[in-house]
C-alpha cells in the first residue's frame, strides 16, 4: 500500500494519464479493469473537481500549463451560472474560487462571487434551505429518469447533500467579503439539516420536499440513490458529515461539531475506518463499496487536521483520519506488483447502486477528494 506521499504522486500521475485520454472532454467514471474513462459532454456536476485536480497537479509537479488549462476550462463553464442547479457551488468553488487563491486572477474572483450570489438567490424563501434546482446536472437524472426523479428536479426538493455542494461557496464568499448574508444563509440550511434530515440514530434521510415560497414541509421523496426509503445512503451521510465539519472549520462553533459527531458516530459504529458499502443497510454480503464516500469524509477531516492550533474538541475526529486514509489507499492502483492498470485509480466507487450505474468504478470525484485530502496534509494548510 502506498504511503501518503506515494499516494499523492500516484494521483498526480492519474491526472496526467486522464488528461492524455480525454482531451477536451470531461471525465466522469472509469472502467475498473482498463482505466478507460467514460466522459460526459457538458461536464455534468463534476467540472470543478477536474479543474481543481489540474490546478493541484500543476502546482505539485511544477507544470504551469496545467494551471493554464484549469483557467481555460473554467471559462468554458461560465454559462452555467444561469442554471438552476445546486452543483454551481462545487462547480465554481473548486474552479474559480481556488484559481483566484492560487493565481490572484481577479476575473476568477468575480466569477466565484457571481456564482455565490446566484446560489444565494435560489434559497428557499421560507426556511432558507438550498434546493436541488430544476436544472440540476447529474448523470442519470435524464438518461435513467423515472417520474419520481423528474419530479425531484425542482426548487421544492432539498437533499442531504446540500450542506456541502450548495454551501461551500458561502463559506468562501463570507471569508472573502465579510458579508454575513453568506454566513446567515449557510446557517439556515444547516438548521434544516438538523431539524429534518438526521434521524434519532444519526443516519440521514436522502430527500425532502418543502414549498419553496413558504418553507412548509411537503414530505419525503422515495430514495433516488439509496437501497430503501428508510435506509442510509453512505455518500449522503458523507456529505452531511463533511458539510457540518466545514461549518465548524469556518466558525469554530461547537454546535456544528456536535452535529458532525452524531453523524460520524453512526458511520464509525457501522464500519469504523473501513470503506463503507454504498448503502449502510444493503444486506448483501457482496454490496458494492463506495470509496468516494470515504474520500469525502477524509477530505473534511484533513482540513480540520491542519488547523493551527488544532482545537482540542476536533481531535476525536482527526484521530480517525490516518486509519481511514490507510484503508482508502488500499483501493488505489497498483494494488500489487502484477497490476498493469493505469496508476492512481481509486477503485470501488459507486455512483448509483440503485440503478447499477457506474456502481463498481473509478469515479472522478472519488479521485478528487482523496487528492484534496492528501494535498491539504502535504501543504499543511487550508484550501478555500
Image (cartoon, rainbow, N blue to C red):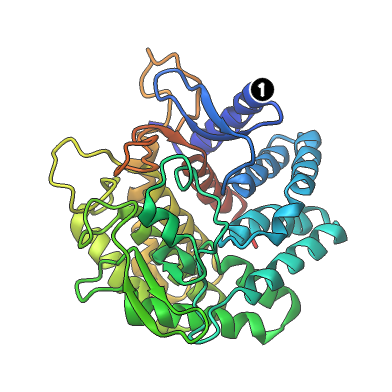
Write down the residue under mark 1.
20
Question: Considering the numbered disc 1 on the image, is that residue within a helix, a strand or a loop?
Answer: helix
Between 50 and 189, the one lying in front of the other is: 189
Of all residues shown, which one is farthest toward the right? 106
Image quarter of residue 76: top right
Q: How many marks?
A: 1
Give how far across and how far down residue 16 sits, in percent.
64, 27
The residue depicted at 26 percent of the width and 60 percent of the height is 267
For disc 1, the neighbor class at 10 Å (few under 14, some 14 to 19, many from 20) is few
The residue depicted at 41 percent of the width and 85 percent of the height is 216
Q: Where the C terminus falls, by quadrant? A: bottom right
The residue depicted at 39 percent of the width and 38 percent of the height is 329
Q: Where the N terminus falls, by quadrant? A: top left
The residue depicted at 48 percent of the width and 84 percent of the height is 253
Of all residues shown, which one is farthest toward the front? 147
Whether residue 321 is visible here, answered yes or no, is: no
Amino acid at each position: 500500500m502506498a504511503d501518503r506521499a506515494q499516494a499523492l504522486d500516484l494521483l498526480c500521475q492519474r491526472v496526467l494519464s486522464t488528461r492524455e485520454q480525454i482531451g477536451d472532454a470531461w471525465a466522469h467514471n472509469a472502467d475498473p479493469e482498463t482505466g478507460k474513462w467514460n466522459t460526459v459532454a457538458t461536464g455534468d456536476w463534476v467540472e470543478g473537481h477536474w479543474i481543481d485536480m489540474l490546478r493541484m497537479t500543476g502546482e505539485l509537479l511544477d507544470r504551469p500549463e496545467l494551471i493554464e488549462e484549469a483557467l481555460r476550462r473554467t471559462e468554458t463553464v461560465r454559462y452555467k451560472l444561469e442554471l438552476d442547479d445546486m452543483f454551481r457551488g462545487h462547480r465554481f468553488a473548486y474552479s474559480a474560487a481556488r484559481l483566484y487563491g492560487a493565481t490572484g486572477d481577479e476575473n476568477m474572483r468575480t466569477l466565484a462571487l457571481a456564482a455565490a450570489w446566484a446560489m444565494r438567490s435560489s434559497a428557499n424563501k421560507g426556511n432558507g434551505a438550498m434546493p436541488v434546482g430544476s436544472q440540476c446536472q447529474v448523470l442519470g437524472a435524464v438518461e435513467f429518469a423515472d417520474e419520481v426523479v423528474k419530479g425531484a428536479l425542482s426548487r421544492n426538493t432539498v437533499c442531504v447533500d446540500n450542506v456541502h455542494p450548495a454551501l461551500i461557496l458561502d463559506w468562501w464568499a463570507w471569508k472573502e467579503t465579510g458579508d454575513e448574508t453568506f454566513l446567515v444563509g449557510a446557517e439556515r440550511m444547516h438548521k434544516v439539516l438538523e431539524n429534518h434530515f438526521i434521524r434519532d440514530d444519526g443516519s440521514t434521510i436522502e430527500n425532502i420536499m418543502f414549498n419553496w415560497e413558504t418553507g412548509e414541509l411537503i414530505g419525503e421523496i422515495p430514495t433516488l440513490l439509496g437501497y430503501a426509503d428508510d435506509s442510509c445512503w453512505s455518500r449522503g451521510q458523507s456529505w452531511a458529515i463533511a458539510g457540518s465539519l466545514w461549518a465548524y472549520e469556518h466558525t469554530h462553533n461547537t454546535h456544528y461539531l456536535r452535529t458532525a459527531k452524531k453523524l460520524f458516530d453512526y458511520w464509525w459504529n457501522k464500519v469504523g475506518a473501513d470503506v463503507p458499502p454504498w448503502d449502510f443497510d444493503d444486506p448483501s454480503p457482496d454490496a458494492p463499496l463506495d470509496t468516494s464516500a470515504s474520500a469525502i469524509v477524509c477530505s473534511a477531516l484533513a482540513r480540520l487536521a491542519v488547523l493551527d492550533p488544532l482545537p482540542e474538541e476536533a481531535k476525536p475526529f482527526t484521530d480517525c483520519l490516518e486509519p481511514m486514509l490507510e484503508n482508502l489507499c488500499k483501493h488505489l492502483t497498483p494494488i500489487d506488483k502484477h497490476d498493469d492498470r493505469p496508476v492512481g485509480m481509486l477503485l470501488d466507487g459507486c455512483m448509483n447502486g440503485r440503478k447499477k450505474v457506474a456502481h463498481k468504478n473509478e469515479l472522478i470525484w472519488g479521485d478528487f477528494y482523496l487528492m484534496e485530502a492528501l494535498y491539504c496534509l502535504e501543504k499543511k494548510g487550508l484550501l478555500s
